Image: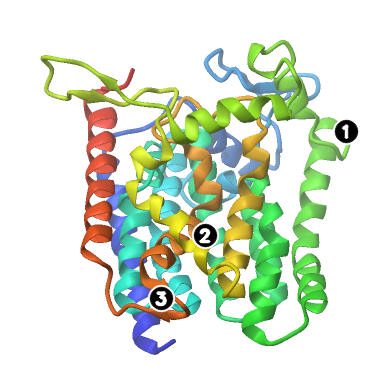
Amino acid sequence: MTVSDRAAAIWIGVIAAGIYVAAGLGLTTDYDYYGRLADAFLHGRWWLTEAPPWLNELLSCGEGRYCVVYPPLPAILSLPFVPFFPTAVAQVVASRIAGGASAGVLYYGLRAYGAPRKYALAGALLSAFGTTLLFSSVDGRAWFAAHSASMLFLSFAFAVAAGGGSAVAVGALVGISALARLPVALAAPALALLCARRSGTGYGRALGAVVAGGLPFAIVYVGYNLLRWGTPLDEGYARLTQGDVFFNQGLFSPVYLLRQLKAIFLEPPDFVPATPFFPRPRFIGMSLFLTTPAFVWVFLALREVRRDVAVAATATAALLALLPDLFHGTVGFQQFGYRFSIDAQPFLVALALTGDGLFRGVWRRRPTAIFILAIVLSLAVNIYATIAITRFEYWQ
């Protein structure tokens, strides 16, 4: 790693964040749970004093009190903007900055992972503009803002682990990321393995340090639950799913796996003849590999798993982060693509690059032509969908 890599990472993050903010100019959201919560935090409250009917996932948590079910990190990131903007604007601006900035952090992480500069740049470009992170961050509604916030800090955790940095810092960064998206916490053991491998320390020692780093944030979240629900358990999610037809087997169940696999591999767009936008994104989602064709190369990376512990750790991190999503009652709608994939996106991007560039422990100097074509196609799909949905409301 060099000074030029650090400078490149900063510039990539700044430019991508700027593009994200510009792409969302004039757009806001009705689902400003986090913006309202940020305003409540500034006034010394962890609850809202009103529950508009369109915010139907607010839950009563006391007399005249309504609590946001989701973890609070996106609201915390919205705090600097709340004094200057309406709550909905504050939330989407924070979402766009976090999502865009993650590209720079991921570039740095990919360089630490071992990817040559051209591959790392391709990975940052793919992540920022060739995945559902683009639409999700620009749209910025509550569910999507959580993904962009989590992505930023999970990319930091991957970068520190891949560089053999402090395992305590890795745990802390995973803990912060989990304060937006709880499933990412399960990636911690695999990141401990990656950190141990790169730093030359024992796995047990690295895992203990990762747990120590994440523990304060787990305590914060338990305390937040106690404030909201009077119990350390995540009672809000349980209450939210009561009577919901999509959760007839509870919040998580093996029964839901089939619908998740269908969403990941098979869900198509709609095809509408005689219209300017012939393929129309469906709000229920679209196959991960139609949304981001470059992710097909993830499967090619698996040939290196037995040979390279870093690749094995990265693949395991991706699987563990996605595990709760695979058994979740819904597939993430309303969305473009399969938004749950963002829970593992730093690892998926690294694996896609590995699939094209790493063979028997040696990296190619530059991406192959067919992989470049897959990246270009990924960019086209996601930029097209973002414009079509946000500017023309072309969403079925």
SS at circle 2: helix
Query: What separation in Å lies between label 1 and label 3 (alpha carbons)?
Result: 47 Å
Residue 364 appears in the rendering: yes
Q: Are marks 2 and 1 in contact (CB under 8 Å)?
A: no
Give the quarter of the figure containing the N terminus. bottom left
Q: Quadrant of residue 163?
A: bottom right
| Crowding near the residue tagged with mark 3, few <14, some 14–19, many ≥20 C-alpha atoms within 10 Å | many
SS at circle 1: loop
| Amino acid type assigned to the residue bearing label 3 in the image | Ala
Say if 207 sits above or below 25 in the image: below
In this view of the protein, which residue sits in the foreground, 65 or 387?
Answer: 387
| Crowding near the residue tagged with mark 2, few <14, some 14–19, many ≥20 C-alpha atoms within 10 Å | many
Tell me the residue that label 1 is attached to. 230
| Amino acid type assigned to the residue bearing label 1 in the image | Gly
Q: In which quarter of the image is residue 156?
A: bottom right
Tell me the residue that label 3 is attached to. 115
SS at circle 3: loop
Q: Where is residue 19 in the image (x, y as percent from the top left)?
A: 27, 53
